[in-house]
Amino acid sequence: MFALNDVTKIYAGQPALGPVSLTFPVGRTTVLIGPSGCGKSTLLRLLVGLVKPDDGAVIFDGTPVSPSNARAVRLRTGYVIQDGGLFPHLTARGNVTLMARHLGWDHGRINARLAELAELTRFPLDGLDRFPQQLSGGQRQRVGLMRALMLNPDALLLDEPLGALDPLVRADLQTELRDVFRAVGKTVVLVTHDLGEAAYFADLVVLLRDGRILQQGSASDLWHRPADPFVTRFVQAQRGPEVRDNEP
Amino acid sequence: MSHETNTRNNGWRVCSSAFVALLAIVAILSPGCSRPANRPVVVGAKKFTESVILAEMGARLAREGGVESRRDDLGGTPALWLALTQGDIDVYPEYTGTITRQMLKADPPDLSEALAARGIRIGKPLGFRNNYALGMRKDTAANKGITKISDLRGHPELRLGFIHEFLDRPDGWPGVKRHYDLPQANVQGMNHTLAYRALVEKAIDLTEVYTTDGEIAQYDLLVLADDRNFFPAYEAVWLYRADLGDRHPKVVEQLRRLEGRISEPDMQRMNATVQEEKRDEGLVAGEFLGRVLNVGDGGQSSDGSLAGRLLTTTVEHLWLVVPSLLAALLVAVPLGILAARHPAIGRIVLAVTGVIQTIPSLALLLFMIPVMMWLVGKGTGAPPAVAALFLYSLLPIVRNTYAGLTGIPAPLKESAEALGLPAWAILWRVELPLAARTILAGARTAAVINVGTATLGGFIGAGGYGRPILRGIDKFDIPLMLEGAIPAALLALAVEGLFELAERAISRRG
């Protein structure tokens, strides 16, 4: 679905990404992982033309993404950011249906799609008429997901979608999100800094550092066949809780 | 001309044409800018009692000549002269000394010929003189042994208060000071009525008086003898446009009936009646015309009842505030959007609107007279006031639109863009609604400033609450001042309340 060909992005004279070449398999979930500032969010923005590459090309469905077709790419791609990026002046319903209304969908079609999505994301129907501030973090994230899926896009991009949630909500939502990914069968690109989360979602994990790809493969490749000492360090830094039973 | 100045000139030209375009928008929105062929005869008046009484007589006599007519109060001599030569007013009462010394700045052998060259006619003297003179409290003068102007030379400590016009005029203080070689340095500019109050309260020692002023008798003041003949004769005359005689010969005929009919005691009495007894100028003028010329409506006031006057001033005031505010919204919101989109343009836009805000409101108002004359052919009344109010209302709205848009968090803008909305839809569906509360707060500030500043419209005949306030100051008539000041305050409160409701309606969503 998406591919990057030798893409470079420079911010304020400093290379932020690249050169990077990467292909995102259709219908699969690719997880971009790495420490902060490694370029994973920049990569996501490049895919929908929110930023332009300084060199190389971003390909969507066989065509290079350019300013002239970036909007068409965005209509076929859902995009979710941390905490949902919801518009505070619109209700949950207003947020989800904004683009469909702009495109002139009729009422019946909008409501049918909304009901479908609320069921898919297990969002309570009475919450649809609340404003974002009146919703919990997990509910906001569901609204963000519904908004991204409204036009039934071919691809779904998520930038740290669960980063702002508390651990219990996060675990619940991870399960739901994976179910959604499986149900819709779309090309998914998810950015996280949590290896556990990456392993949970990913068909393909891509580890980035300083704007370059260090290793790509399955999560277990990263655990058992690290390509670089940094991969080992990154993997080991993500230690789980140490619970000892035999305290004296 | 160097290349650099050339470029600068071009830039200036671009700026000024943009400015003119803005004003043209205001002009289209502002009322009464067209100039109908059979418009009423307008009689100008300066902002003091005598001039207003004479102008009321002029308006009544013009009606006798069978046309619609009204009085326009227009501040000082330069504004009246400009309005007369430009055709905003048709006629006004002036004084011969002022014509030669201030307007022509020459003493031509044939005054009417010199004026005719400018398309202006002068009538014969109305009968009385209203000379400039210097006045003091009798007790102060007696203590210091002063009876004539040359006696002032021995008293450099005297505190002097004059109206600003007298301070500047060659036939005013600069001329007297030179002619008599006077030493006084403590000189303040103040309103004529306030100068009289200050003199009575002994806050100043000497002020200029007009020999027909009602206050001279009222406060029993000493008029110093002009022992070296500095002040010229100020004989009251009609000044009117040459084309008035062509358009309405009967009006000119009627106006000239007043020639030689008003004696100095007559004028003093009429001034005193208005000043002391707080009688309406129109009534006093009407009574005089009825008695002396046997003219129609006797003593009827042209101003009507309190409720009628309030309704008129309120409607006039709203005609200043509403069009200027709407025009400002239509222009300032796009300017704010432009400023938020292009930081370089934004700095210029914010700086220019900021500079406009620092221009004193009265100066801006006067500056608008020739500009609006040139743009819409009407340099007095509502158009210049609306234009000035429009310019004043820009800054708060531009600045808040800019702040509201640039204050939107980056992730929200990115979300809107990532949805695939085109730029105009992002602005319309996301950014403007998010900035709405801030923009509304700017409009609220602009509206309240606008209601207050619009009272200055009284200076250029724009009407509104400013008219009773300014007339009240001139006559030291407090109830008349309040007749403008209280409704103005109430209107400001009403505007506040209206915006409060609008803000609540907006913030109920989210």
Image (spheres, coloured by chain):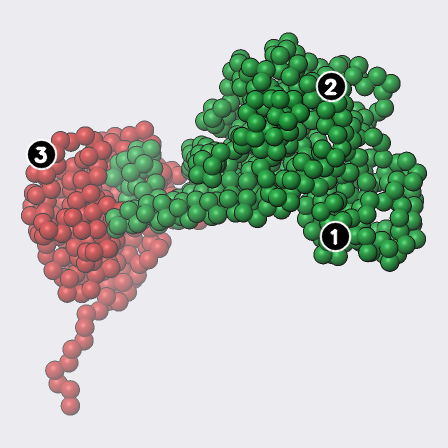
Chain colours: A red, B green
Find residue B123 and name its label: 2
Residue pointed to by mark 1: B199
Find residue B357 and name its label: none
Who is closer to the viewer here, B187 or B449? B187
Residue pointed to by mark 3: A108
Decide if residue B258 is on the left or right side of residue B141: left
Which quadrant of the figure contains the C terminus of chain A? bottom left
Marks 2/1 in contact by CB < 8 Å: the verdict is no
Which chain letter matches label 3?
Answer: A
Secondary element under disc 3, as helix, strand or loop, is helix
Do badges 3 and 2 share one subunit?
no
Who is closer to the viewer here, B82 or A227? B82
Going by the numbered disc 3, the residue's amino acid type is Gly
Depicted B327 relative to depicted A227: above or below: above
Which chain letter matches label 1?
Answer: B
Who is closer to the viewer here, A19 or A153? A153
Q: Residue at x 6, y 48 (%)?
A: A119
Quarter of the rendering containing residue B246: top right
Q: Residue at x 12, y 36 (%)?
A: A110
Which chain letter matches label 2?
Answer: B
Decide if residue B108 is on the left or right side of residue A21: right
Q: Furthest residue to the bottom?
A: A248
Closer to the eye: label 1 or 3: 1
Which quadrant of the figure contains the N terminus of chain A? top left
Q: Position of residue B96 (x, y in %)?
A: 78, 26
Closer to the eye: label 3 or 2: 2
Quarter of the rendering containing residue A47: top left
Quarter of the rendering containing residue A172: bottom left
Going by the numbered disc 2, the residue's amino acid type is Gly
